[in-house]
Image: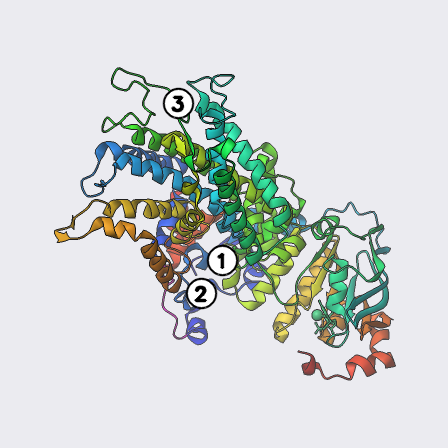
Amino acid sequence: MTTTRIAETAPTAPPAPHLGAGDRLRLWWSALPRPYQWGIGVPFIALLAALPILRPPILTTQGTDFGGVLAQFGMYALLAIGLNVVVGQAGLLDLGYVGFYAIGAYTVGLLTSPDSPWNQTDTWLSRHWAWVFALPIAIAVTAVSGLILGTPTLRLRGDYLAIVTLGFGEIVRLLADNLQNITGGGRGLSGIAFPLVGQTPTRTKGVFSAGNTHLPLNFGTWWYWVSLALIIVVLLFVGNLERSRVGRAWVAIREDEDAAEIMGVPTFKFKLWAFLIGASIGGLSGVLYAGQVQFVSPPTFNVINSMLFLCAVIVGGQGNKLGVILGAFIIVYLPNFFLGRSDLFGIPIDGNAIADYKYLFFGLALMTLMIFRPQGLFPARQKLLSYGREVYVVARRAALAAAGRLPAADEDGAR
Amino acid sequence: MSIGPNDPQAGAEHTDQHLGAEEYLTQDSVEEEFLPDGGVAQVAVDLADVDPVLADPEAVAQLVAPDRRIRTEVGAALLRMEAVTMRFGGLVALDGVSFEIRRGEILGLIGPNGAGKTTCFNAMTGVYRPTSGQVVFDGRPLGAIKRNQITRLGIARTFQNIRLFSDMTALENVVVGTDARHRTSVPGALFRSRRHRTEEQDALERGMALLEFVGIGRRATQKARNLPYGDQRRLEIARALATEPKLLCLDEPAAGFNPTEKAELQDLIRKIRDDGYTVLLIEHDMRLVMGVTDRVVVLEFGRKIADGVPAEVSSDPAVIAAYLGVPDDATA
Ligand SMILES: Nc1ncnc2c1ncn2[C@@H]1O[C@H](COP(=O)(O)OP(=O)(O)OP(=O)(O)O)[C@@H](O)[C@H]1O
Ligand SMILES: [Mg+2]
């Protein structure tokens, strides 16, 4: 009955809304019943976890151990998730995020390394579990450092905040480099604790020790599994926050801070929370790093790494917590993929040289992305409501009906 | 018709409030070619499908009605501007302005461009602190209270130049407003406390009711920036109402509207007042102001030049000289 009206109002309109592949996937996923989501999600995660065992031929890195690369990916994924809370969700440009990574790693180092004057492994932290005990302490320390950095600086906006945080990242590294008596300066801290479990005659120091190089379950694989577990936990928590008053406050602040404040959002408080949560997750990643490498020294925490983390977030798609994990994978995996490769699908290449120029390539990739797809590879479509599922289901039904693929009434009946 | 209007409960009034579904969809698909986000954002949903209660306007109005724990009696002054002066360097934007807004009324605030109307709003909502004088709301001087706390005390506003959270859906925008009344913070949300869950449910229910109330229920899952202009203005009103204000301040809500839309807006403003809110309205369109307000305050060059019932004010020579002398379209 309204066809004539359509013709009048929008003669050039295409007949039905067109949905992109990503949106279709999203609609499909969000409308799936919970058990189905589990049924797909769990095997998928199992497959991810099995990667270092399966070692798929093309995917497996040649120049470095695949398990180790995956472990590093795990840490970067955590960093990307944490930084995404700050940059992607709350819209606070933090260029010194590496500082929190450093604080997390150094806290574990200072508490458990024999080189440290504050080594506690032989007093109240047991050798076996020192790393595990140091973990919550390190997270608390980074959270407090986030609070200390945030309280004075979060009154600044935009570029000013970026510059102050950049300074923070540099200060942390310089402290690590110059407090010789405590941090060991440029020599760093070695012999950091790791969980002593799974000791066998071949793995004398357990599965997590850097000495465990027995393929495929070498120490890299084990640390990858630990980080995978932590990623899942962190994602659940971050997801809970996203679909709550907190996540909505962050997005509102990102969109229009003054309007948010006038709509009753305590903006300063929630910005501080974003900083604190981002810092804690960054610290957690640092703890993993300290445990896996069992050695910390200042160059690891160079400010260029902050840019790399940011690159992961931007490439993945700011605000999309799964997207930024893929971003982290790209950042970690690609250079390692080329490392030690002399040919790719029969074409001779100098893989080591390509890996050396990673910053150049990431820079170029970032510029290309900003020109052609500024929202990142996987742009965010955050869900900000806890019980919004019903609304999305109805929306999907309407979308499909509108696209003419199934009549609305049919699905109604099926439900 | 595929969606919505086939719902028998919806009735004629329900469909009247909206355009036909097809019309919405075709409009969208035109925009959508250029919009990478799309998806859910582009589809009109019938909120009555989500919650059948929303098909009944009575129930919607009930859900939208404000918390009535207001100290001020009906008819007494809910907000008083007491000799408020606002200076920007050498410019006096408000010069000893005093007036009151009585609970339950619709007060019009009019004046030529640059008279200081928006500045008045900003002084009430804490965006600017008065250079001298004070604003007393519901028996309490606003002094140095933070902006977000003023909102929670019960003053909500819309903006002259629309300021929605453009990347959020319409529903999410409104829910940000309802959050002003919620208390869940990070720990509660992290562990999904019981309070968090009840608040989320309340937010969703009230949010949808509000969208339905202002007549944009179908737009619930669309991003604010993809909404047509008029719906964005309505969404601003819904978001402000969501904070459960005692006083709702509308800054030129009809700017850019055609006569039909203005008439609809007039009905909406009345409906809001009848639901128990007090309304302060800045508007240039005299027909709208005279048609809907109970009292009018007139500003000119930061000074109050008249205050009274619409008929009185419109025959006041000072007002005619200052304001009504200016042709209507010169103020657009
Ligand atoms: N932040 C500010 N800094 C300096 N001057 C300001 C500021 N805000 C408002 N003004 C000035 O105060 C005067 C009153 O402005 P205001 O926006 O309140 O007018 P208005 O009555 O809302 O006008 P309009 O009908 O155009 O919206 C104007 O001259 C304006 O330039
Ligand atoms: Mg104005």
Q: Chain of mark 2?
A: B
Q: Which mark is residue B28?
A: 2
Q: Are marks 2 and 1 on the same chain?
A: yes
Camera-side residue of A405 and A227: A227
Residue A13 on the magenta span = yes
Answer yes or no: do the residues labelled 2 and 1 have beta carbons within 8 Å? yes
Q: What residue span does the magenta drawing correspond to? A: A11-19
Q: Which residue is mark 3?
A: A195
Q: x and y percent of residue A413 in the render?
A: 40, 45
Q: Chain of mark 3?
A: A
The CA distance from mark 3 to mark 2 is: 56 Å
Q: Which mark is residue B222?
A: 1
Residue B165 on the magenta span = no
Q: Secondary structure at mark 1?
A: loop
> In the rendered structure, which amino acid carries the disc numbered 1?
Gln
Q: Earlier in the sequence, mark 2 or mark 1?
A: 2
Q: Are marks 3 and 1 on the same chain?
A: no
Q: Secondary structure at mark 2?
A: helix
The residue shown at (59%, 32%) is: B194
Q: Secondary structure at mark 3?
A: loop
The CA distance from mark 3 to mark 1 is: 49 Å
Name of the residue lying farthest toward the left: A346
> In the rendered structure, which amino acid carries the disc numbered 2?
Asp
